[in-house]
Amino acid sequence: MTHSLIKRFICALAAVAAISAVNAAPAVASERPMFVTIHEAGDGHTARRITIPYNKAVVVELPLDAADILVTNPAIVDAVVRTPRRTYLMGMSIGQTNAYFFDARGRQLLDLEIRVERDLTPLNEIYAELLPSSNIEINAINDNLVLTGFVPNSIAADQARDLAGRFIGSADAILSMLNIEANEQVMLQVRVVEMQRTLARQLGVDLSAAFNVGSVVFSPMTQNPFSLIGRSLGGLGPSTTGGQTAGWQGDPGEFLNGTIRAFERNGLIRTLAEPNLTAISGESASFLAGGEFPVPGGRDSQGNVSIEYKPFGVGLGFTPVVLDEGRISMHISTEVSELSSDGAFQLEARSFVDPDSGEIITVPGTTIPGLTVRRAETTVELPSGGSLVIAGLLQDTTRHNVDGVPWVKDTPVLGALFRSQEYQNSETELVIIVTPYLVDPVAMSELATPDLGFVPPNAIDSTLLGRLNAMYSVGEGSAGRHLQGPVGYIVE
């Protein structure tokens, strides 16, 4: 009886356990995730990283026989299997890829991370031979090269970049991060001096007469203009008493008057400019001291004129290149221009009918002046602090006009009474002195400005004494505290 009860109890427990297991099985299957093993490229003890030179190969020796080889990008790396344990990997193009080696049981033997780059050993040898004073490091990024290190000057930097561009066949694929050891800032001191001397002479005779021939009265008169300058010097006309007048009075109604015009003008012009420009090596800088004058660019149907402005004055432009410490190559262009009536263009007045109001609108004419230009452009090489004179810019112009009565003016002696002569001479000489310096920036406290020491006048000095600035001695005033010794200007 007891054994039967025990047997039934064990069977019941077994049934309960079986039912519990059946009921719990779906829950376990739904809660427990499926385990997946993923081996990323470059992870694990079989991973290696290699760099293959472009258009070259490496040999891979395996300790076990490989049954399966996979190269993810055959266009970059091509694999040639010679034996189960020896494989040749050839770099076909610049880039990155990887390769896997498996044995017959599917186990991973080798995982290669491969970079195909150019062999930079020949370029390093070229730098060592041609640029021995430079310390250049080359880094490859895909099909691009990055240059780092130090070079003595900008010329060496440009040469290094050019050599690298020719090595890989593309200058756009070169990124230069080279540091230049030489001083790169160049200040150019320029002194432009021009002297002009002009001489003009005018000599003319005007005659007026009246005499009777029978019952006919003749009144001949000569008025010879000055065509070279366009008018009499000083603005005097032929009937002025500024010259010498001789008269003859004959019969009533008969007379002879003569006016002699003799004038002379001497002129002297001095032009001086001293611009200073600073630019880094390889960059351009320009300077203009003068102005701009308007030039009509065109006129529409309504008479509106478009204006363009042309510069004139003393202009300078230069591009320095520091060859090495103390040697500077410069491309210099300078010019001196001024407005002139010679070669001027006159735009005539124009009238048109307004289509809206029907009124006649007249647009006045305008005169566009010409330019007298002296220009020089050159490329020179100078040491820092050395000067160069651009001279020999000489110009000598002589003009001589004779106006008078045809045939009569050519008569000896008496012909002078029937003609006017005008003589003009212009001489110009331009000298340009340029001096480059290698410079460094300085502190603001070491610089001076033209207004240093200027103090505006107070109400009493300005109103009662008529002064334009305050008067003080050295050591007085806010600005004078920085002055030492006999300095400054004296205003009386």
Image (spheres, rainbow, N blue to C red):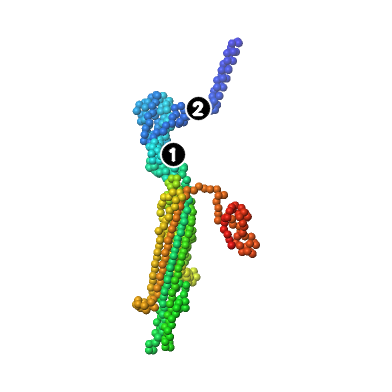
Q: Residue at x 49, y 48 (%)?
A: 439
Asked which quadrant contains residue 325, the reply is: top left
Asked if residue 1 shows in the view, the reply is: yes
Q: Nearer the viewer, residue 98 or 6?
A: 98
Of the residues shown, which amino acid type is indicated by label 1?
Answer: Asn
Which residue of the protein is positioned furthest toward the bottom in this rendering?
215
Q: Residues within 10 Å of mark 1 (few under 14, many from 20)?
A: some
Q: Nearer the viewer, residue 95 or 7?
A: 95
Residue on which disc 1 sits = 135
Instruction: Return the x and y of residue 275 as percentages of the image width and height.
Output: 48, 55
Q: Residue at x 47, y 72 (%)?
A: 234
Instruction: Return the x and y of residue 288 as percentages of the image width and height.
Output: 48, 57
Asked which quadrant contains residue 87, the reply is: top left
In this rendering, position of residue 17 left or right of residue 125: right
Residue on which disc 2 sits = 35
Of the residues shown, which amino acid type is indicated by label 2?
Answer: Phe
Secondary element under disc 1, as helix, strand or loop, is strand
In this rendering, position of residue 122 left or right of residue 242: left
